[in-house]
């Protein structure tokens, strides 16, 4: 097993990509902490982790609230005594064209996606610095690289995450803590189920591999970044998008 005995915190892991990351980690020997605003669904994911033979802790935590985040980290330390891996996955969209985008929708997306990532990274850095080890993985998006009409708030939040990942990597490298981002393309989850058939068809035309990604496509890359195979990789953004963005 690639992550035997590790403890991972995955935010927004009640469903979708976050849930798949938690299950993939658990299959490789990791105890998982499931944080989400949706308590009932988070509890379900935690039960599924336990069915795989690992320990699990679920918490109704809103990543935008630093007080909640800090209290949640203390709970994890009480139960597990350490945190080896943080995956900042919680994220939302509130799409609209710039002209029609409300200030509230701008603020909310930046708050959940970018400030939430900052909050969890800041709170987890204290125990990781003490441990002199840690892996931080931030879920960005190719939209943070290429931009997208109707997603000014989302693209700015995800570009911010990519920059935050680099600064985190530089600050924490001397203590053996890595920070990397994963930039998914068009992945089959409830987030993309909201899109119209027409938009989905247009997006698919842009994917050279001619299919939507599966949450497991993202989880597998997170697994690699969390493992010792990636010990010498930090500050990077790995694009997982079926070839939509090519550098
Ligand atoms: P999803 O909407 O299925 O799941 C997101 C989860 O985050 C939900 O369980 C939700 O309750 C939770 N969440 C929302 N706000 C929260 C908060 N303030 N605190 C804690 N938890 C919160 O979305 P999906 O598709 O699984 O996305 C996961 C991540 O992947 C997001 O960061 C998203 O931006 C990113 N992503 C997704 C892509 C896709 O095509 N589905 C493409 C690129 C990036």
Image: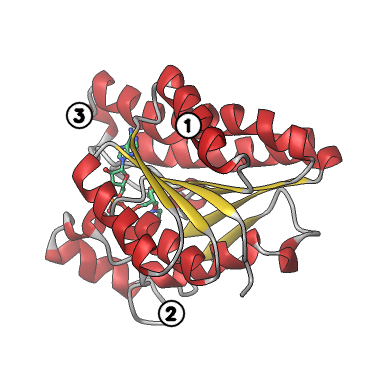
- Secondary structure type for disc 3: helix
Comparing marks 1 and 2, which lies closer to the viewer? 1
Name the quarter where the C terminus is drawn: bottom right
Label 3 crowd bin: few (<14), some (14–19), many (20+), radius 10 Å: few
The residue sitting at 29% across, 32% down in the picture is 98
- Secondary structure type for disc 1: helix
From this viewpoint, is residue 241 visible? no
Above or below residue 134? Residue 103 is: above
Q: Depth check: 34 or 205 in front? A: 34
- Secondary structure type for disc 2: loop
Q: Position of residue 72 (x, y in %)?
A: 45, 30
The residue sitting at 51% across, 39% down in the picture is 79
For residue 127, which quarter of the picture?
Answer: top right
Q: Depth check: 100 or 24 in front? A: 24
Q: How many labels does the image show?
A: 3
Q: Earlier in the sequence, mark 1 or mark 2?
A: 1
Which residue was labeled with disc 1? 75
Q: Earlier in the sequence, mark 3 or mark 2?
A: 3
Check if mark 1's residue and mark 2's residue have beta carbons within 8 Å: no
Q: Which residue lies furthest to the bottom in this view?
A: 209
Check if mark 1's residue and mark 3's residue have beta carbons within 8 Å: no
Which mark, by number, is residue 100? 3
Which residue was labeled with disc 2? 208
* Left or right: residue 220 compared with residue 166: left
* Left or right: residue 132 compared with residue 70: right
């Amino acid at each position: 097993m690639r992550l035997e005995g590790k403890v991972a915190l995955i935010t927004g892991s009640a469903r979708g990509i976050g849930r798949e990351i938690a299950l993939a980690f658990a299959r490789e020997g990791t105890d998982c902490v499931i944080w989400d605003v949706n308590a009932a669904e988070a509890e379900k994911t935690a039960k599924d982790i336990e069915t795989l033979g690992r320990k699990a802790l679920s918490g109704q935590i809103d990543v935008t609230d630093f007080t909640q985040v800090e209290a949640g980290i203390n709970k994890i330390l009480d139960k597990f005594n350490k945190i080896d891996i943080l995956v900042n996955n919680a994220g939302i969209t509130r799409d609209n064209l710039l002209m029609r985008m409300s200030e509230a929708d701008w603020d909310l997306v930046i708050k959940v996606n970018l400030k939430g990532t900052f909050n969890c990274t800041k709170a987890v850095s204290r125990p990781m610095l003490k441990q002199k080890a840690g892996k931080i993985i931030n879920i960005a998006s190719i939209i943070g690289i290429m931009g997208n009409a109707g997603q000014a708030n989302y693209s700015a939040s995800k570009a911010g995450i990519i920059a935050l990942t680099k600064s985190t990597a530089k600050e924490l490298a001397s203590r053996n803590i890595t920070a990397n981002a994963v930039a998914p393309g068009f992945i089959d989850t409830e987030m993309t189920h909201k899109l119209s058939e027409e938009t989905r068809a247009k997006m698919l035309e842009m994917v050279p591999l001619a299919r939507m990604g599966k949450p497991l496509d993202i989880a597998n890359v997170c697994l690699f970044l969390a493992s010792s195979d990636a010990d010498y990789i930090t500050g990077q953004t790995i694009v997982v998008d079926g070839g939509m963005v090519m550098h």
